[in-house]
Amino acid sequence: MRQRVHIEGRQLEVSNLDKVLFPEVSFTKAQVIDYYVRIAPVLLPHVAHRPVTFTRWPNGVDGQAFFEKNNARHAPEWVRTVTVPSPGSSRGRETLDMVLLSAVPDLVWSANLAALEVHVPQWQVDDDGAARLPDLLVLDLDPGPGTGVVECAAVAHRLRERLVADGLDPVVKTSGSKGLQVYAPISCADRDHPSRYAKALAQALTGETPDDVVWRMEKALRPGKVLVDWSQNNTAKTTVAPYSLRARPLATVSTPLRWAEVDELRAGGDPESVRFRTDDVLARVEEHGDLFDVDARPRAALPD
């Protein structure tokens, strides 16, 4: 069943609102849309100028999913789009026409497509749609078999110390899945600078504690260790946006944390204490505001 809705001066059509997209917790498309509307004030600043890659789950998280980058062709005329280069495209495209989610109606439109997850790069586009140099550094902490978010918290603490020593002001969030992600606002000399710096950092931590940390991606190296994934700084890659839903059975959210929460976790805290669902996240924003407000933090020059 389809119905028309009016939001912030835009008219759009939504459908199948009672469709259950997260069967384990009976979370419907209507609830997905409602969450994205309510979280918009803190989500939109983090994605508004970053081309979006969607992961769409039209039949829910138990069904088939697909990534969609070249998604502007689906968009209403009022959704801002941008054409970006696509070097090395697996489909031979030289450019991609991508969406910028800039307003609440844009989020409703994408949520209605069952675009449960929102992924963005570490760079923005300017007013003319041209790609700027990266403005964020990211280190994705992914626990291997036999480890979990507690071990990730220990590594996140070490990364924070290194980043602060280099003049950066890091923030941290859950991935919404198994691990943590440490970010820092930066300025840099060239588009590959963040990858070089992040790789060297991951290698340094691995060298100090090779039994606990790994910087290489091979799965055979990962049991009992936390992968410090530095590769997400490649300008062709994306990471899940803060406050995005994750397509996991419990409808969890990639949630900004306070560093005190990371410290409590690494001291033996309960891993469930950092598994957040939509109501939890909305309550946290009401209490703490945006814990991931990178624009309020100094954008320090990235060391060589």
Image (tube, grey):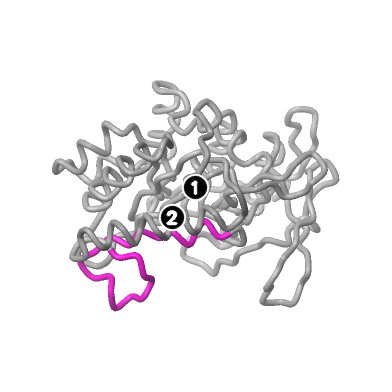
Q: Name the residue that disc number 1 marks.
A: 137
181 w.r.t. 292: above or below? below
Query: Looking at the image, which residue sits at the far left?
Result: 268
Q: Which residues are magenta?
A: 214-234
Q: Name the residue that disc number 2 marks.
A: 198
Q: Earlier in the sequence, mark 1 or mark 2?
A: 1
Place residue 161 in its image quadrant.
top left
Q: Pointers 1 and 2 in contact (CB under 8 A)?
A: yes
Residue at (70, 34) in percent of width and height? 103
Question: Crowdedness of circle 1 by 10 Å Cα count: few (<14), some, many (20+)?
Answer: many
Amino acid on which disc 2 is placed: Ala
67 and 11: which one is in front?
67
Q: Residue 48 appears at what percent x and percent y?
A: 67, 39
Q: Say which element carries label 1.
A: strand
Residue at (35, 58) in percent of width and height? 202
Query: Looking at the image, which residue sits at the far front?
Result: 304
Place residue 214 in its image quadrant.
bottom left
Q: Residue 86 appears at what percent x and percent y?
A: 72, 66
Question: Crowdedness of circle 2 by 10 Å Cα count: few (<14), some, many (20+)?
Answer: many
Q: Is residue 269 magenta?
A: no
Query: Looking at the image, which residue sits at the far top?
Result: 287
Q: Residue 200 appears at what percent x and percent y?
A: 39, 58
Q: Residue 127 appears at what percent x and percent y?
A: 79, 39
88 w.r.t. 74: above or below? below
51 and 65: which one is in front?
51
Give the side of residue 254 with respect to residue 7, left or right: left
280 and 135: which one is in front?
135
Give the side of residue 270 with respect to residue 69, left or right: left
Q: Is residue 229 magenta?
A: yes
Amino acid on which disc 1 is placed: Leu
Residue at (50, 44) in percent of width and height? 302
221 w.r.t. 138: above or below? below
